Image (spheres, rainbow, N blue to C red):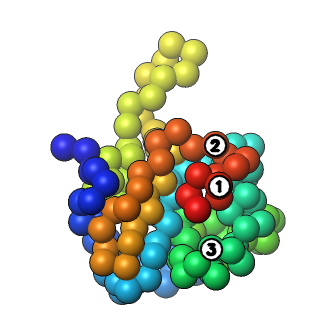
Amino acid sequence: MALQQGDQAPDFEVNDQDGNPVKLSDYKGKKVVLYFYPRDNTPGCTAEACNLRDNYSEFQKQGYEIFGVSTDSEKSHQKFIEKQNLPFRLLADTEKQIHEKYGTWIEKSMYGKKYMGTARHTFVIDEDGKISNIIEKVKTKDHTAQIL
């Protein structure tokens, strides 16, 4: 069953780009933006990350912690952060454990070929660890406005 607004956000623990474990339950009392994206350094994902980067101080002012999640490796995330000067952490969900819990590892199709990949969804989680918003139609260049 798909997650819905008001549901408790599933807890997880995976490493960030530097190999440091990130556990969602450690952020209780904070608001969290958990955004899932397909690939580091691709045009849409870069536009989305840069939009969040450019508005990062506004997120901080409003008490948000931002985490990007993809199936890329820690090393790939490090390069993406360096290249785009990203101020937030990227989570290396190489085993797809967060994807499975959040229902973002889905069948996609391109040019008639079916394959498994990441759904570009964003989950906004409140201070109590509940999902306050799910954005499924992400506008990569204007994602901040959708969240705030």
Q: Amino acid at mark 2?
A: Lys
| Residue at x 64% of width, y 82% of height | 61
Report the residue marked by disc 2.
139
User: Which residue in the structure is indicated by mark 3?
Assistant: 59
Q: Residues within 10 Å of mark 2 (few under 14, many from 20)?
A: some
Residue for point 37% across, 61% down: 132
* Alpha carbon distance from label 1 to label 3: 11 Å
Q: Amino acid at mark 3?
A: Phe
Dot placed on the residue nearer the N-terminal end, 1 or 3: 3
The number of discs equals 3
Q: Looking at the picture, tell me which residue is in the foreground, 42 or 49.
A: 49
Q: Pick whichever of labels 2 and 3 is earlier in the sequence.
A: 3
Dot 1 and dot 2 residues touching (CB under 8 Å): yes
The residue under label 1 is 145
What's under tag 1, amino acid-wise? Answer: Ala
| Image position, residue 27 (x, y; %) | 40, 83
Quadrant position of the N terminus in the picture: top left
State the quadrant of the C terminus: bottom right
Q: Quadrant of residue 89?
A: bottom right
Q: Is residue 122 above or below residue 63?
A: above
